[in-house]
Amino acid sequence: MAALRTSTDRADRDGRFACIARPRRGRSNARNAGRKGGGAVRILAIADFFPWPATRGGMLRVARNVDILARLGEVDLFSLYDTTADTPVVPDHVRIKRLGLTPYPAPGSVVHSAVKGHLVNRLPWHVALRSRDGRPRDECRAFHQPPYDVVWISTAATWEWLGRPHFGPTIIDLIDLEDVKVLQQAALDRSAGGERAGALSARWREQVKTRFEAGTWRHLQKNAVRLAERVVVSSEIDAVRLGSPKAVVVPNTFTRPAQSVGSSAPGRPPTIVFPATFDYPPNAEGAQWLVREVAPRLATRVPGARICLAGRSTPEVEALAAPPAITVTGFVSSMEDQLAQADVVIVPLLRGSGTRLKILEAMAHRVPVVSTTIGAEGLDVADGVHLLVADTPDEMARAVARYQDDPDLRARIVDAAEARFLDRYEDGVAEVRIRELVDELVPPPAPARW
């Protein structure tokens, strides 16, 4: 990869980058060739984080979408970025014309955010806390160079932080639905009873707070649907939840590996891998449930089984380590190395929306999967056909044991899972959907005059 160069070849003293990509030659699509004046389709992509290197699910989705858009037209990319991370670098194979970067909006006054942003403007707390910082909004307006044929924005939060821009026909990628996750967390809290919720009055206050927070996310998502030409989600379930004809499914997909790394037979004892970024709360909660509830039952059913929590971690998750039974890897440069050692991929998620790339990656590499219902939600997969679904600790331990004890079942499932991945979730599927979206929003080329 080669770094894009800035006008000064470095960030200014405020950490702002204003980058211009080196010109890259590439073929234009048929619509580009026939456009009035012979110009390419002009696309502005706005990202909620700089997507390379793509080390987590959301980044993989953004990186893939930008790459596809760059093959469909001439792309300007404007991205929020973490000033504490490495200098942003665009891969050579991604053809970006112009690149603008601005730091994440800074959190403002908690009191102001609570009163005006959260209560009055009905913004989600996470969004309201950073909405007073106008710098990203101002820099995005200064960066954009209309007219654009299509504007692609990742996440409703980013759209809000940038002042709900409308620089051309707009597509907002909601990725998943945050209100669903908030309500799922509330249900988990209620199921824990008094131990977590406290007295009746405390439970009532928590329910009111949760319903309001879920309502703010729903309000923001509805505004995105109302003001954008299209909104994108990753599953049919989320499209139904939105209930709008503007909602279009662009599934999460994964690049087909040159060679799968899954083993044909399980190890004895087996290694069970939970691949995730554990600074994402649903993954951290799943890891704690896996270690505290599932692992003891697994040790009884499959003696010697080892659980590996593979991916960027936190102190709370690191504290779960108890080698050799429980290991925590921390950041890994390539999940393929972990999958090569995995006899089973386990996805113990208790809340979530959208779809899980970790399941698609395991399917692509022929590693059998055990998942909760919520973990597998949104994917066109069936229990006992493409994976095993288990929602209680006992069921999870039993599912892992089934893969150990029944090699025919294991072989049937990895064969069916790989076939389903190639048919529905290989990267080419997303490219077709995005191309159709762009073609739908871009006016047809003017007829030639003779």
Image: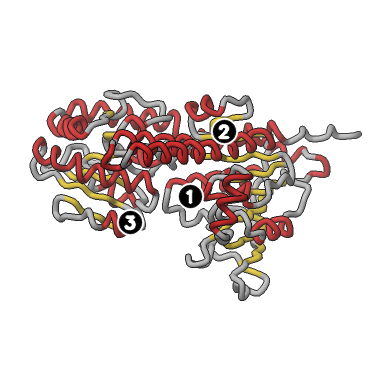
Tell me which numbered mark, 2 or 1, is placed earlier along the sequence: 1
Looking at the rendered image, the disc whose residue lies closer to the viewer, 3 or 2, is 3
Q: Marks 3 and 1, Cα distance to the nearest angstrom?
A: 17 Å
Q: Quadrant of residue 266?
A: top left
> In the image, what residue occupies the spot 21% across and 46% down?
291
Residue 360 in view here: no
Picture layout, residue 201 above or below residue 74: above
Q: Is residue 170 left or right of residue 251?
A: right
Marked residue nearer the N-terminal end (3 or 1): 1
The residue type indicated by label 1 comes to Met
Name which quarter of the figure residue 184 lies in: top left
Amino acid tagged 3: Ser
The quarter in which the C terminus is drawn is top right
How far is the residue under mark 3 from the one under mark 2?
35 Å
Task: Name above or below for residue 396 compared with residue 327.
Answer: above
Mark identifier at residue 313: 3
Q: Are marks 3 and 2 in contact (CB under 8 Å)?
A: no
Indicate which disc residue 432 carries.
2
Q: Which residue is mark 1?
A: 59
Amino acid type of the residue that numbered disc 2 sits on in the rendered structure: Val
